[in-house]
Image (tube, rainbow, N blue to C red):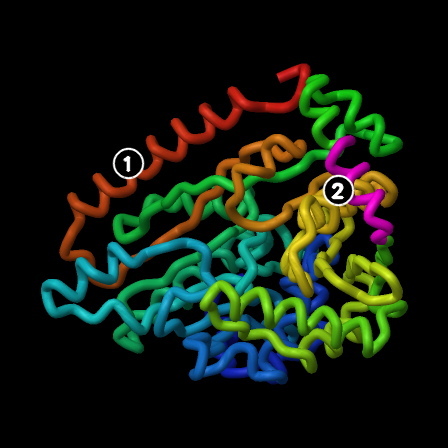
Amino acid sequence: MPSQQYQIKIHSRISEIPADQWNALVENDHPFIKYAFLHALEEHHCVSEDYGWIPHHIAIYNSQNRLVAGMPLYEKHNNYGEFVFDQAWEQAWNQIGLPYYPKLVSATPYTPVLGQRLLIDSQLPAEQQNQLLTLLFDSMTGFCEQQNMSGAHILFAKPEQQAWLAKQENPNSYIRHDCQFHWHNRNYRHFDDFLAQLKPKKRKNIRQERKAIQQTGIRYRVLDGHQATEKDWQDFDFFYQKTFIEKWSTPTLNLEFFKKIGDSLADNIVLVLADHQNECIAGALMFKSDTHLYGRHWGAAHEVKHLHFEVCFYQGIEYAIEHGLKVFEPGAGGEHKIARGFSPVAMQSTHWLTVNPFEQGISRFIEHEKQAIEDYMQECRQHSPYQSD
């Protein structure tokens, strides 16, 4: 099918795209790509000019005006909430009088989670799917040039799409490397099955941490969006806001957003709340797809030793085992995750530059970063808690 039979639109609001048609392109019931999540961010002003996230979603329609491809896309005026850091690039651009912002970013805001960035109708023949992938990428770069932006960046694309992007061998594109820590379900039936795979000392440490928390009398509630009450969301919002403010950071999400996704993504929500003496004292907001659990936000009224590990990691692992989820992605960073069963996983992102006055410098930067990440991951593997590693 020739490309001229497609209509390409840039939408300034996700609400301009039919929700059912967008969701039909989403794989694996992935919560952060679904229309409801992106719409809630926009509806409750979590993404806006104020935060430097301005929607420019790409949609490709066929001759029957049906959506066959899409890309979540944002104009950025800072790098907040991206989790792929490019301050050194910004400084280099500024030193020679070139503006680095605005730029384009394809990602889910504030969410360092692997997923689709190029949404394609999987029912189409492979040839048409490949053509649409190319159209999406070319539409992104073309819009970037048209708007005089410095570049377009595709962050946390799922491995298959990142591999496709790498194969394009575009001279303006660069692949950056990073590392996260994920937990993998080895067909465990119970939490003790997981512990049995660990080295004795690591197994003992986890049991001691969990026992110490248990002795405090803290109890846990694991809720989906149907079960979570307005009071539960109020408590969690308090924890979320408190955590960001204490870190001197910007809390971009808000209570109305949490209540909205609690309703519109009820089956994807996993809200872990910790109660002590009839008071909710901490919570972690997780999400699930058909195969994955994603840890996103955490907060507590006050510090309790080991409570973060229990609420954010062990409760999540237990949930993943109970529900047969294959992978638990707890979020970016954190070497402390290794001792608790999480393994290093290589991450990549694609960066297309409109103008690159530092071709050799950027190439060297990429190679040094790649080697540093490989060395770091190798060192992490040496501290694996698993007996078989």
Image side of residue 106 versus residue 18, left or right = left
Q: Is residue 389 magenta?
A: no
The stretch of residues the image draws in magenta is 207-218
Helix, strand or loop at label 1? It is: helix
What type is the residue that disc 2 sits on? Tyr
Q: Residue at x 60, y 59 (%)?
A: 120
Amino acid at circle 1 = Glu
Mark number displayed over residue 276: none
**Magenta span main SS:** helix
Question: Which residue is the site of mark 2?
Answer: 314
Which class describes the residues within 10 Å of circle 1: few (<14), some (14-19), or many (20+)? some
Q: Is residue 141 above or below residue 289?
A: below
Using the rendered image of the protein, determine whether residue 25 is visible from the camera's viewpoint. Answer: no
Residue occupied by mark 1: 367
- Which residue is depicted at the point 73% across and 53% down? 28
Residue drawn 58% across the image and 55% down it? 116
